[in-house]
Amino acid sequence: MLEGIKVIEMATYIAAPGAGGILADWGADVVKIEPLSGCPMRYTMQNVGAEHLKGSPI
């Protein structure tokens, strides 16, 4: 649905990262920029089974 759309996500905490994940599920190319310490949501949401975490290094 969103193939060819590029998104740069620089947000943390539930709503915005969730939206980036949904956009990725719909076919957008989402690049997440996070602090060196990592996004806090990366560690709390890793076992949810979300499709957008497939390409995640965790």
Image (cartoon, helix red, strand yellow):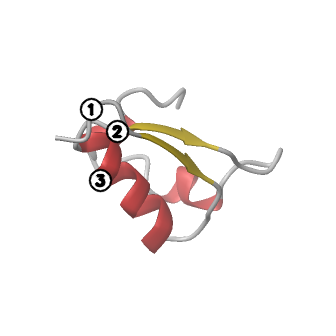
Sequence-wise, the earlier of marks 2 and 3 is 3
Image coordinates of residue 15 in percent, x first then y, are 44, 73
- Element assignment for label 3: helix
Q: In this view, does 3 lie to the left or right of 17?
A: left
Sequence-wise, the earlier of marks 1 and 3 is 1
User: Three-letter amino acid code at disc 1?
Assistant: Glu
Q: At 37% across and 50% down in the image, what residue appears?
A: 21
Q: Do the residues under discs 2 and 3 have CB atoms within 8 angstroms?
A: no
Q: Say few, some or many: other residues with alpha carbon within 10 Å of mark 3 (under 14 / 14 to 19 / 20 or more).
A: some
Q: At 25% across and 42% down in the image, what residue appears?
A: 25
Asked if 25 appears above or below 44 in the picture, the reply is above
User: Three-letter amino acid code at disc 3?
Assistant: Ile
Q: Which mark is residue 28?
A: 2
Q: At 42% across and 54% down in the image, what residue appears?
A: 20
Q: Mark 3 points at which residue?
A: 22
Q: Do the residues under discs 1 and 3 have CB atoms within 8 angstroms?
A: no
- Element assignment for label 1: loop
Q: Which is nearer the eye, 22 or 42? A: 22
Q: In this view, does 51 lie to the left or right of 5?
A: left
Image coordinates of residue 13 in percent, x first then y, are 56, 70
User: Three-letter amino acid code at disc 2?
Assistant: Ala
Q: Residue 3 carries which label?
A: 1
Q: Which of marks 2 and 3 is in front?
A: 2
Q: Which is nearer the eye, 10 or 6? A: 6
Q: Say few, some or many: other residues with alpha carbon within 10 Å of mark 1 (under 14 / 14 to 19 / 20 or more).
A: few
Q: Do the residues under discs 1 and 2 have CB atoms within 8 angstroms?
A: yes
Q: How far apart are marks 2 and 3 (CA)?
A: 9 Å
Sequence-wise, the earlier of marks 1 and 2 is 1
Q: Which is nearer the eye, 21 or 47? A: 21
Please count the marks in the image: 3
- Element assignment for label 2: loop
